[in-house]
């Protein structure tokens, strides 16, 4: 199976299945000398683990990280860092029935068409549990980015038709809210909405926003590895993400150039922008302002409401999916979006180190 490796300078390989013995990641190319402890990684994993509130799957997993290599005496060694999280609460019997049919909204048909075989237990590699390895890698990258003065944080901006009021934005509320919203009032409204859909045997989607502060101007490659293109690939590789917006996103198609352009001005001896419609990226390269990205997340496809589908014998059938499922994946996906953005930015920062001859000469002379 190809496509399990992400990155160029720092590569992240995720492995494992939803109902296998364990999942994890191998991170190669990460610089030596960064102080890392299992608690740095665990605090991120705890934000995505299941069974933490009434609006997540009841599947209980500790999701405790085990560091197998690449860290010695509390610091990265420069060698591949391998991390593992064991599955401890699999109920594969919940999925025995779905082996015979294709679930609407899932990758079942695609896997059978591609491989002629699939791991039907929780979706195998297409399960949201694959993102555990991404979060492990994201924790490492965030730790180094923070030391560089770069802050990456994500939060839920909407669930269904409930959206945050930015005048009530409270960053501390993000990790307190079961929905991941930085607005306590919207969190309460969204929580009730999710519970209602769950009782109806349905699910709902939403939107996640990620802000990256402190990235200097000049990061990103101007052709195929544009910063916005790289971020888009990284975030759309998350299973439930169906659309990405940078800056004003889809609204730019409704604006005139005079409305969309960000004018420049001098302030404290440096060039800044008066506005940030571009979301911090121009020509595929960072412009020094905040990078703003939004990811649109689809509703969880596993629902107990009646749905029509086809079985492997080619018969039309009606199904109701049982088992333990999230009525919304948005809150647990917040830290995954954050992680993929951190990995991408650090990878491109490392590419940027040799963009100028003077930088290479200065380093080695």
Image (tube, rainbow, N blue to C red):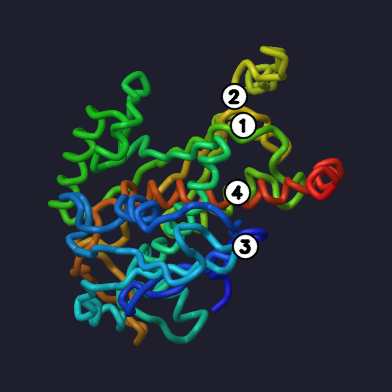
Q: CA distance from mark 3 to mark 4?
A: 11 Å
Q: CA distance from mark 2 to mark 1?
A: 6 Å
Q: Position of residue 278 (x, y in %)?
A: 62, 30
For image coordinates 54% across by 43% down, the residue present is: 145
For image coordinates 61% across by 31% down, the residue present is: 280
For image coordinates 20% across by 64% down, the residue present is: 59
Q: Position of residue 302 (x, y in %)?
A: 28, 63
Give the residue number, with chain letter if any, for mark 2.
Answer: 276
Q: Is residue 196 left or right of residue 182?
A: left
Which one is earlier in the sequence, the residue at label 1 or at label 3? 3
Which one is earlier in the sequence, the residue at label 3 or at label 2? 3
Residue 280: image tag: 1
Q: The N terminus is located in which quarter? A: bottom right
Which one is nearer the viewer's eye here, 72 or 163? 72
Give the residue number, with chain letter if any, for mark 4.
Answer: 346
Q: Residue furthest front?
A: 73
Which one is nearer the viewer's eye here, 23 or 309? 23
Residue 300 to residue 82: above or below: above
Residue 303 to residue 250: above or below: below
Q: Position of residue 83 (x, y in %)?
A: 43, 68
Q: Are marks 2 and 4 in contact (CB under 8 Å)?
A: no
Q: Nearer the viewer, mark 2 or mark 4?
A: 4
Residue 43 to residue 314: above or below: above
Q: Secondary structure at mark 1?
A: loop
Residue 222 to residue 182: above or below: below
Residue 319, by quadrant, is bottom left
Q: Is residue 249 left or right of residue 326?
A: right
For image coordinates 35% across by 64% down, the residue present is: 65
Residue 18: image tag: none
Q: Are marks 2 and 1 in contact (CB under 8 Å)?
A: yes
Residue 29: image tag: 3
């Amino acid at each position: 199976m190809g496509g399990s490796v992400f990155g160029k300078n720092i590569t992240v390989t995720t492995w494992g299945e939803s109902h296998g013995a364990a999942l994890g990641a191998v991170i190669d190319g990460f610089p030596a000398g960064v102080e890392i402890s299992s608690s740095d990684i665990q605090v991120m994993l705890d934000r995505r683990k299941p069974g933490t509130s009434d609006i997540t799957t009841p599947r209980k997993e500790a999701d405790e990280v085990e560091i197998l290599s690449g860290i010695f005496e509390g610091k990265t060694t420069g060698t591949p860092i391998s991390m593992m999280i064991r599955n401890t609460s699999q109920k594969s019997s919940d999925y025995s029935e779905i082996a015979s049919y294709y679930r609407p909204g899932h990758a079942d048909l695609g896997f059978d068409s591609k491989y002629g075989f699939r791991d039907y237990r929780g979706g195998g590699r297409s399960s949201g549990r694959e993102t555990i390895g991404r979060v492990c890698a994201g924790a490492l990258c965030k730790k180094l980015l923070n030391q560089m003065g770069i802050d990456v944080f994500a939060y839920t901006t909407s669930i269904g038709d409930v959206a945050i009021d930015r005048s009530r934005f409270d960053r501390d509320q993000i990790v307190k809210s079961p929905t991941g919203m930085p607005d306590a009032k919207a969190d309460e409204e969204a929580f009730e909405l999710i519970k209602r859909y769950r009782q109806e045997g349905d699910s709902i989607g939403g939107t996640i926003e990620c802000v990256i502060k402190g990235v200097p101007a000049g990061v990103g490659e101007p052709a195929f590895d544009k910063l916005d293109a790289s971020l888009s690939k990284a975030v759309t590789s998350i299973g439930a993400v169906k659309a990405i917006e940078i800056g004003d996103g889809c609204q730019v198609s409704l604006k005139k150039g005079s409305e969309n352009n960000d004018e420049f001005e001098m302030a404290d001896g440096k060039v800044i922008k008066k506005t940030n419609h571009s979301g911090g990226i121009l020509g595929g390269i960072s412009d020094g302002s905040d990078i703003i990205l939004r990811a649109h997340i689809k509703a969880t496809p596993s629902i107990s409401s009646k749905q029509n589908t086809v079985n492997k014998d080619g018969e039309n059938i009606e199904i109701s999916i049982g088992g333990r499922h999230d009525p919304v994946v948005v809150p647990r996906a917040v830290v995954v979006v954050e992680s993929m953005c951190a990995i991408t930015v650090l990878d491109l920062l490392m590419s940027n180190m040799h963009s100028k001859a003077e930088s290479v000469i200065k380093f080695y002379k």
